[in-house]
């Protein structure tokens, strides 16, 4: 979406744009954690792709891409239809894989019903101890911390006695954001009554519900909720590296292919995050715009060393965090960064730091403008959502 909107803005109507997607909807995945706790009558943050394409004066093709033929400059869809391209931007995301057998693997909106089921069990008292488990090699653990804190706050609001913890191979909570941010995250967790158990590598769930650990030991639990491990997509004709991710250069070009670009979770950078995906898309859009003869400055190439921004829901205040990543996707202590508890509610779509998509979603309905700072499901929050604050 970011690449499509950026290109249309930068090159005007001089180029024909086609959006191909296997789904008809853009489900705004950063809202998935919130949506598990929201009232049933609240609309999900989901947008019709045909409508977005139409707003961007692009053609929408609903279909699953199966192969790229770089020499012929065509893509083949599962329907056997082929589409020609001059430039191709791939943003196919990653495949979510369950890494902890027996756990509820929370991928995104798809697991909202199961998460709601777990909350009902908490209310009934048939579940008391819930462990949120970060598997090794998890590319973006932040949603799991949100789920843990939102669950604790839900239990407290309903007067339920629950024991909630986060188990992670990391030594400190969300350490990718640096020491200061991590300390604040820990403080928020403690305030919510969520225990952090670091330095433990989750393996699988036992018959009695407990979480078995690699290298020995178990953590008692009635239910385990886990983050997935991600794998790259399988598209014939597109090269892939470790775990199937696609290698790209600093301007988003797919290694060894001409005029084929890739952005987002499918690329080989170890951290998978929407703001990062959007920044990659912006660079690609500008590179293509320059090729089309448009006079725009190409922003600094995507490379390790860039700041990423994120917001963490679930505590008393949303935390706005910034960090600089090194080449391995770890926190670069020399790179600065910050963490600020937000005083004002912020629109949910701002959870992704995306220049063009952010502006576009800001212009859409109440669902896109839902507050991300008030306690989920509270009257205050509902009122703000209705008022579009
Ligand atoms: C629960 C959760 C919370 C998150 N919170 C945040 C957050 O707060 N901030 C943030 O910045 N990031 C967050 N992220 C990460 C962010 O959502 C992803 O990094 C981002 O969505 C990646 O975008 P993408 O375009 O690479 O992939 P996706 O968003 O996965 O989109 C890929 C699209 O390609 C389509 N597709 C896949 N295969 C094919 C095919 N073969 N042919 C045609 N179409 C195909 C899919 O249907 C999908 O629509 C969160 C992720 C999750 C799961």
Image: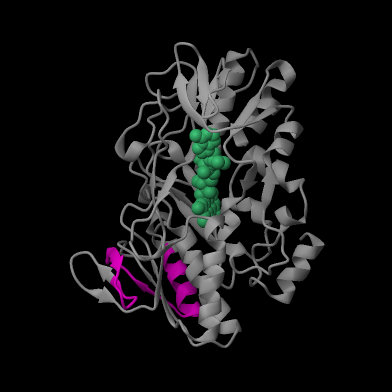
Nearest the eye: 284 or 47: 47
Tell me if 103 is positioned left or right of 251 in this view.
left
For residue 102, above or below residue 288: below
Q: Which residue lies furthest to the front in this view?
A: 79
**Residue 183: horizontal and vertical position, in percent?**
42, 68
**Residue 242: horizontal and vertical position, in percent?**
30, 38
Asked if residue 201 lies in the magenta stretch, the reply is yes
Q: Residue furthest left?
A: 215
For residue 53, above or below residue 122: above
**Residue 91: horizontal and vertical position, in percent?**
52, 34
Quadrant location of the N terminus in the rendered image: top right
- When asked about the image quadrant of residue 228, the answer is bottom left
Tell me if 186 is positioned left or right of 284 in this view.
left
- When asked about the image quadrant of residue 167, the answer is bottom left
Quadrant location of the C terminus in the rendered image: bottom right
Residue at 33% x, 64% y is: 168
Q: How many numbered dots are placed on residues in this image? A: 0
Look at the image and tell me whether residue 235 can be seen: yes
For residue 77, above or below residue 208: above
Nearest the eye: 255 or 67: 67
Tell me if 231 is positioned left or right of 26 in this view.
left
- When asked about the image quadrant of residue 267, the answer is top left
Colour scheme in the image? one colour
Asked if residue 356 lies in the magenta stretch, the reply is no
For residue 18, above or below residue 165: above
Residue at 54% x, 75% y is: 119
Q: What's the magenta region?
A: 182-211
Nearest the eye: 15 or 209: 209
Look at the image and tell me whether residue 299 can be seen: no
Residue at 57% x, 54% y is: 30
Q: Which residue lies furthest to the right in this view?
A: 387
**Residue 335: horizontal and vertical position, in percent?**
41, 46
């Amino acid at each position: 979406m970011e690449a499509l909107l950026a290109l249309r803005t930068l090159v005007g109507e001089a180029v024909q744009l086609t959006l191909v997607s296997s789904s008809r909807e853009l489900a705004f995945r950063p809202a998935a954690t919130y949506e598990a706790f929201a009232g049933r009558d609240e609309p999900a943050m989901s947008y019709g792709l045909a409508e977005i394409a139409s707003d961007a004066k692009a053609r929408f093709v609903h279909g699953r891409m199966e192969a790229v033929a770089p020499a012929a400059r065509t893509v083949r869809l599962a329907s056997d239809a082929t589409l020609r391209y001059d430039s191709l931007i791939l943003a196919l995301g990653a495949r979510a894989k369950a890494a902890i057998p027996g756990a509820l693997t929370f991928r995104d909106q798809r697991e909202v019903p199961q998460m709601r089921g777990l909350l009902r069990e908490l209310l009934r008292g048939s579940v008391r101890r819930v462990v949120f488990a970060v598997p090794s090699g998890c590319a973006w653990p932040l949603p799991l911390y949100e789920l843990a804190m939102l669950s604790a706050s839900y239990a407290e609001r309903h007067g339920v006695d629950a024991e909630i913890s986060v188990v992670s191979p990391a030594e400190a909570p969300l350490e990718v954001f640096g020491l200061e941010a991590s300390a604040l995250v820990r403080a928020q967790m403690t305030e919510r009554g969520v225990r952090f158990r670091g330095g433990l590598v989750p393996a699988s769930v036992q018959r009695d519900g407990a979480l078995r650990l690699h290298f020995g030991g178990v953590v008692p639990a009635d239910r385990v909720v886990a983050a997935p491990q991600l794998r790259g997509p399988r598209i014939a004709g597109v090269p892939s590296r470790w775990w199937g991710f696609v290698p790209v250069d600093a301007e988003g070009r797919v290694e060894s292919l001409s005029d084929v670009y890739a952005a987002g979770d499918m690329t080989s950078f170890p951290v998978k995050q929407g703001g990062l995906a959007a920044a990659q898309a912006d660079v690609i859009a500008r590179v293509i715009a320059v090729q089309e003869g448009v006079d725009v400055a190409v922003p600094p190439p995507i490379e390790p060393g860039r700041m990423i921004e994120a917001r963490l829901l679930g505590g008393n205040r949303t935390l706005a965090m910034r960090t600089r990543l090194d080449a391995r996707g770890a926190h670069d202590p020399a790179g600065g960064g910050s963490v600020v508890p937000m005083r004002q509610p912020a629109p949910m779509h701002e959870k992704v730091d995306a220049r063009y998509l952010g502006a576009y979603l800001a212009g859409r309905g109440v669902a896109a403008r839902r507050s991300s700072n008030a306690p989920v499901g509270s009257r205050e929050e509902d009122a703000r959502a209705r008022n579009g604050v």
